[in-house]
Amino acid sequence: MKKVIIIGGGIIGLCSAYYLQKEGHQVSIIDQSNMDSGASYVNAGYLSPSHLVPLSAPGVMKKGLKWMLNPASPLYIKPRLDADFIKWTLAFNKSCNANHVKKSIPVIKNISLLSQTLYDDIKRDEDFNFQYEKKGLLMLCQTDKTLEEELETAHLAKREGLDVHEISKEDLKLLEPNATFNIKGATYYKCDSHTTPQEFMEDMKAHLKAVGIQFFLNERVEDLVQDKDIIVAIKTKNQTLKADEFVLSAGSWSSLLSKKLGLKLLLQAGKGYRINTTQDTGITIPSILAEAKVAVTPMHGFTRFAGTMEIAGINDKVNKIRVEAISKATTSYYPEVILTQEEKNDVASGLRPVSPDGLPYIGKSSKCKNLTIATGHAMMGWSMGPATGKLVSEVISNKKPILDLHPFHPDRKF
Ligand SMILES: Cc1cc2nc3c(=O)[nH]c(=O)nc-3n(C[C@H](O)[C@H](O)[C@H](O)COP(=O)(O)OP(=O)(O)OC[C@H]3O[C@@H](n4cnc5c(N)ncnc54)[C@H](O)[C@@H]3O)c2cc1C
């Protein structure tokens, strides 16, 4: 049994705590917030093996540069004279190639499928009430060009063994009789599932408290006390906490803390927004509005519209132009859904921790023997949460990891 402190109680921290406790470790979670907001609460709730292609794919950098001029674009990279940002951008650009995509696809698929199975296990084994539905995911396309691209991606996913097919507008109407669409065509990934994130987070926190995990809320870890390559303790404003092992799952803030150990964890925050509506949208199957890159999820009691990726530093400023872009895209694809001003004013944001190559960091750096890093999941952190937690617990328990950890190595070169 080891004493483990987890820094950061988002989905990654909570799932790590869950599996570590099952292995018999004594676990605490420390978080700078009240643990009720941020990426793990505002996300679209997709468990999406369909998302096989990493963010850093051919053409993305070019698109990103073009989109910089458009304040309503779904991806925005704000140029900054900041060494970390420049290093990240160069590494991102280097990863945007076909070979990297080819190598990453099976890696992403395996961790996503493992995670989906672990969500199944959690739903089966625990007394959790969270919404968990297996209705698949529609990729809705408004132009022939996008439809063609999506059919290509679907073909690739099919080759990887995923259940996906093109769906005609007639069949879509049968599938979603109460929604109206303005689209050219769509693909349908039956392999995907969805959840209401807030519900899972609340269920998991209640479970962890019940099994004796200690929570330190509103306590920011400000320093890590090291003795050579071992962390001895962490320091907050009010206290010093000691443990045998530490987990760094502080999301977008992780690189700030890793710097204190001399680690160069390349990571940028990718801000996204969600708008919820309790209107009767008629939407029962999650969809992605392919051109606008907006995710639509029928959650428990409301429909969520989530989107944009703003790489513009760590802040929670709301960019109203981008919020409006999500709303406009919604009505453009679903003409009968009009989000109200009140719903738009109620927007919430979250920061995705984005690595330069679209793969998370999971494992130990050679620089520190008792720190397990678990971050950088970008748009896939919700999907990959349980699998990441399981891998973290295997690393700390000195067990052979269920997946090969090399592609996720925190010291990997870009
Ligand atoms: C709009 C949007 C839609 C998304 N949709 C999906 C989706 O459908 N499917 C999917 O798989 N993923 C999705 N994602 C991505 C997913 O939400 C993230 O990858 C995931 O939530 C990241 O989890 P995390 O635990 O790493 O980070 P976070 O949830 O950010 O948690 C990190 C925690 O660390 C704490 N912390 C930071 N620094 C310190 C410190 N110094 N001391 C103490 N505590 C600290 C923070 O307070 C925070 O609570 C979406 C994200 C957004 C924004």
Image: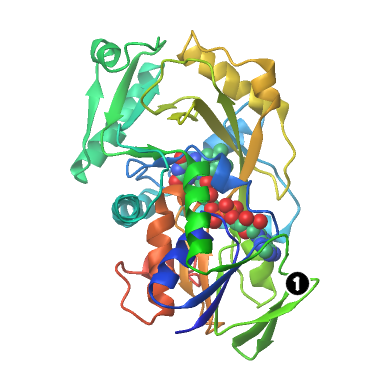
**Crowd rating for badge 1 (residues with CA inside 10 Å; few <14, some 14–19, many 20+):** some
On the image, which quarter does residue 58 sit in? top left
Left or right, 388 with respect to 166, comes to right
Q: Is residue 62 above or below residue 377?
A: above
Which residue occupies 22% across, 41% down? 162
Which residue occupies 58% across, 34% down? 308
Left or right, 151 with respect to 267, comes to left
Which residue occupies 46% across, 31% down? 300
Residue 165 in view here: yes
Along the viewing direction, whichever of 203 and 147 lies nearer the viewer: 203
Q: Which image quarter is the N terminus in? A: bottom left
Q: Residue furthest bottom?
A: 228
Along the viewing direction, whichever of 201 and 151 lies nearer the viewer: 201
* Amino acid type, mark 1: Thr
Along the viewing direction, whichever of 414 and 359 lies nearer the viewer: 359
* Residue 228 image offset from top left, x and y in percent: 63, 91
- The residue tagged 1 is 236
Q: Is residue 71 above or below residue 265?
A: above
Residue 354 in view here: no
Q: Which colour scheme appears in the figure?
A: rainbow
Q: Residue furthest right?
A: 237
* Residue 240 image offset from top left, x and y in percent: 73, 80
Which residue occupies 62% across, 43% down? 350
What is the total number of numbered labels drawn onto the structure image? 1
On the image, which quarter does residue 144 sit in? top left
Does mark 1's beta carbon lie closer than 8 Å to ligand 1? yes
Which secondary structure, mark 1?
A: loop
